[in-house]
Image (cartoon, rainbow, N blue to C red):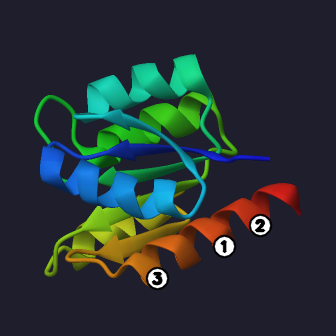
Amino acid sequence: MTHKVLIVDDAKFMRVRCANILTGAGYQVIEAENGHQAVLVYQAESPDAVLMDISMPEMDGLEALMAIKAYHSDARVAMLTAMGQQNVILEAIKGGAKDFIVKPFEPDRVLASLRKMLAQKSA
């Protein structure tokens, strides 16, 4: 079974980099460029996991996380974050994020986080 992953980042190059890592590992990828779009795409596509940037225009990653969790409490979301956003990471974890990945990220770290989240889903 191919898992569907939603990548949310306002920087296209980050979405492309992440998508290349995931498609190379056999995942199906869908994308959104801001939090508002992420919520709509999540509701329409029901992805198995979400990798979401924190700092974005229109609706940031924390707001989108809360909206997605309100829609589907079992949503598997990992936050993508820059160094120095520790306070925001804590908020995201309290809000239901399963993991956080610090940019610039290593492909192995991204894949390990996804495997961990998807394993929790089937447990």
Q: Residue at x 21, y 33 (%)?
A: 59
Any mark on residue 119, and which?
2
Q: Secondary structure at mark 2?
A: helix
Name the residue that disc number 3 marks: 108
Q: Whole-Å distance between the Cαs marked 1 and 2?
A: 5 Å
The three-letter code of the residue at mark 3 reads Asp
Name the residue that disc number 1 marks: 116
Q: Residue at x 56, y 32 (%)?
A: 70
Q: Position of residue 37 (x, y in %)?
A: 31, 24
Q: Is residue 99 above or below residue 13?
A: below
Of the two numbered discs 3 and 1 on the same chain, state the one appearing first in sequence.
3
Q: Position of residue 115 (x, y in %)?
A: 65, 70
Q: Residue at x 50, y 34 (%)?
A: 68
Who is closer to the viewer here, 86 or 4? 4
Is residue 104 rendered to the left or right of residue 119? left
Q: Is residue 54 visible?
A: no
